[in-house]
Amino acid sequence: MIRISSRVWSVWRRNWDAFLRTYRVNFIPPFVEPVLYLLALGFGLGTYIEAVDGIPYPVFIAPALVSISVMYSAFFECTYSSFVRMYYQKTFDAIIATPVSIDEVIAGEMLWGATRGMIYAALMLPVLLIFGVVAMPSSLLLIPFAYLAGLLFAGIAMCFTAITPSIDALNYPSFLFITPMFLFSGTFFPLDLLPQPIQYFALAALPLTHVVGVNRAITLAAFSPINLLNLAWIAVATVFFFILAIRLMRKRLIV
Amino acid sequence: MTLPGEGRQAKECCICTTPLTHQEAGTIGDIIVAHDLEKRFEDLIAVDSISFGVRKGEVFGFLGPNGAGKTTTMKMIQCISPKTGGTLEVFGMDVDTHQQEIKSRLGVVPQETNLDPDFSAYRNLLVYARYFGIPKREAERRAEELLSFMQLEEKRDVLIEKLSGGMKRRLIIARALINEPKLLILDEPTIGLDPQARHLIWERLRSLQAQGNTLVLTTHYLDEAERLCDRLVIMDHGKILVEGTPADLIREYAGNDVVEVERTEKVIARLDELGLNYDLAGDMLQVFTDRPNDVARDLLEVCRHEAAVTVRPATLEDVFLRLTGRSLRE
């Protein structure tokens, strides 16, 4: 049984306050990343690629850039950053000496990770608009959807944080899970170019595949029934990892 | 020559290492009541069926070597480590079922400095107040007040990493007071501090007690315990060995005075002849006695003033070392 009260927002606020204190450096990646990727891949490499399924290459990769940014920001926030707060700064210990429970601390961390993903999506949107690679107004949906996608990656991240023996061991999920997803989730080339078994694997086990699917529908303003499947997969996985993360963290921190 | 009265005192000292079979479990109305409290980990019993009571308004100390079970006991009182046996009530509420209520009325000074490095001293207090749901205006008022109470006004906007060890400890105490707790739990409040910082903290803790607060502390500094604690327990291997006021414990387990003398054959022979009990302390012998001057004079005569003999009042440290031994604990 997981009990979460409104106290969860005090944990969220702590991270928000810390984020604002260093906002200058935090705001650089969402502006710089899409510019670099669009120039290098979209308009550089992309000149050799006429179109993917009839879509100009920069337009094809734009939703992937948002998805990747949401994944990275939420995942790294709830792995390395949460681990630093938990293990090195003892921030969790300090908070659970107050009426805030460990469930609320972990939930607050994940809600914050999701928020960070959403902030990044919101900051990237104007850049993508300037490049003219996303449709409006449907692309405004990128922002709320980034919160859901962010919560999914935050939950997965927090599960790894709960079982990792050290901060170095967090490199395993980063390189063996996140990096392959970055490349093989229909991000820079369509999924159907891959052999069939790998396609099924990507749909079953790589969350980013579903996130890219939804985001691409949003930026192209072209929705299909498959997007409902994407959303259902994401919703179920989000709830599952959210609860699992709290349970694993309880096991780690309550001794 | 036998000194009158010495034999009895010596005998009393022999019982020191036997743990008390009877422990005071505390009575109704006490702020903390523990009965057969136990904390068992997979391969060890950290707290082995202890009973104690902490009365309202007193300073109660937990003493003991590393690994004695003090910090584990503190964590069970704070509701952050579940007990595995016995009963434990804080403010008359069960720690298993009323965690939120108990934690909202507690102030905690942890052993490890876990201030938030992302914020200034002042912001640390405000962020912490939010965890208690204290409204912003009220939190600001209390934060200013507490900074001045702990003499940290000048460090108000300084980041944690720029504070000295003593300032950090003071800020942690200020933070523990942000919810105006009636009970303060302090796990080694003055660890690693210089004498000035320790004296300031002692003085502040005493004034908190004078305001009617109850303080529970652990410490390795026996002078600190002797100064601050109204009552204390000495723990070892998860059990409470003794409980009482510092003065009573000293009188009972170390006597009033200690005669320290160099460890020579002649001295040992004379002490054995007198039937006096002594402890080995490196190359010194310690004789716990109520007749220090008589013993000292006698020993000086016997060794023809070749060995140094000093007389000093017995301290809590003597009690502690007699009860828990001199071997190192890791």
Image (cartoon, coloured by chain):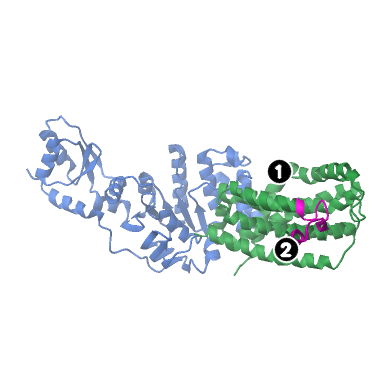
Q: Colour of chain B?
A: blue
Q: Quadrant of residue A250?
A: bottom right
A197 drawn magenta: yes
Residue at screen point 43% across, 54% down: B71
Of all residues shown, which one is farthest toward the top? Answer: B306
Image quarter (top left, top right, bottom left or bottom right) of the N terminus of chain A: bottom right
- On the image, the x and y values in percent for residue B12 come to 19, 53
The amino acid beneath tag 2 is: Ala
The amino acid beneath tag 1 is: Thr
Q: Is residue B4 shown above or below A156?
A: above
Of all residues shown, which one is farthest toward the left? Answer: B1
Q: Do discs 2 and 1 share a chain?
A: yes
User: Where is mark 1, residue-wise?
Assistant: A22
Residue at screen point 11% across, 30% down: B304
Say left or right for A179 vs A48.
left
- On the image, the x and y values in percent for residue A94 come to 56, 53
Tag 2 secondary structure = helix
Q: Which residues are magenta?
A: A183-199
Residue at screen point 22% across, 37% down: B284
A186 drawn magenta: yes
Answer with mark 2 or mark 1, whichever residue precedes in sequence.
1
Say left or right for A240 vs B318.
right
**Chain letter for the part of the structure drawn in green:** A
User: Where is mark 2, residue-wise?
Assistant: A204
- On the image, the x and y values in percent for residue B280 come to 22, 42
Tag 1 secondary structure = loop
Q: Closer to the observer: label 2 or label 1?
A: 2
- On the image, the x and y values in percent for residue A17 come to 69, 49
Foreground pick, A49 / B124: A49
